[in-house]
Amino acid sequence: MQIYLYFIIFIMGTFFGSFYTLAVYRIPKRQDIVHTHSYCPNCNHKLGFLDLFPIFSYILLGGKCRYCKQKIRPRYLILEILSGLVFVFMAWLIGLDVYFLNVKTIMNYVFVILYFTFFVLEISIFLENKKVDKYVGIYGGIVSILYMIYLCITIKY
């Protein structure tokens, strides 16, 4: 059963990895990262449903856009796979276990993922654009404040 949990977490991590690549591209351009449909940055064609499955669509399409046949940079695939692996590794480190799931462990995992998202976005945007994005920094601050509130509520003295 544990392997199924980690498989689901890996798939979730790859979708987050796909979101990271989208966000790193759009945030510096001040484009919407939530409501605007994913599109090819070369031909601007909206991606279809099957194109939104990160690793599989990259492999099945041979690393090219389905519509304009432009090559997709392999770093997208690498980031998606690494995100899936990091999600599984963090779940293993925290001790996320299908037989002993509890709110505390799940909440700790959620906050680890939120922090990981902050670091990936901030570092990737900096490497890509040589500047720190203040909105991603605000996101990191909000996550930190929420985590401190969570700790104050749950820690028993």
Image: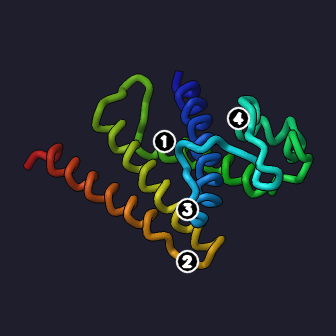
Q: Are marks 4 and 2 in contact (CB under 8 Å)?
A: no
- As displayed, is residue 13 above or below residue 142? above
Q: Earlier in the sequence, mark 3 or mark 2?
A: 3
Question: For the residues marked 3 and 2, what is the alpha-carbon distance in whole angstroms?
Answer: 14 Å
Q: Residues within 10 Å of mark 1 (few under 14, many from 20)?
A: few
Amino acid type of the residue that numbered disc 4 sits on in the rendered structure: Phe
Point out the tag, 4 or 1, that comes first from the N-terminus.
4
- For the residue carrying disc 4, how many other residues have a C-alpha within 10 Å: few (<14), some (14-19), or many (20+)? some
Q: Name the residue that disc number 1 marks.
A: 92
The crowding category of the residue bearing disc 3, from other C-alpha atoms within 10 Å (few below 14, some 14 to 19, many at least 20), is few
How far is disc 3 from disc 1 in space, using C-alphas?
Answer: 36 Å
User: Image height check: is 103 above or below 14?
Assistant: above
Residue at 60% in and 47% down: 19
Q: Is residue 83 left or right of residue 47?
A: left
Residue pointed to by mark 4? 53
Q: SS of the residue at dot 4?
A: loop
Instruction: Point out the frontmost of discs 4 and 1.
Output: 4
Tag 2's secondary structure? loop
Amino acid bearing label 1: Trp
Q: How many marks?
A: 4
Residue 124 in the image: state x and y as whole percent: 60, 65
Residue beneath disc 2: 131
**115 and 71: which is toward the camera:** 71
Q: Which residue is mark 3?
A: 30
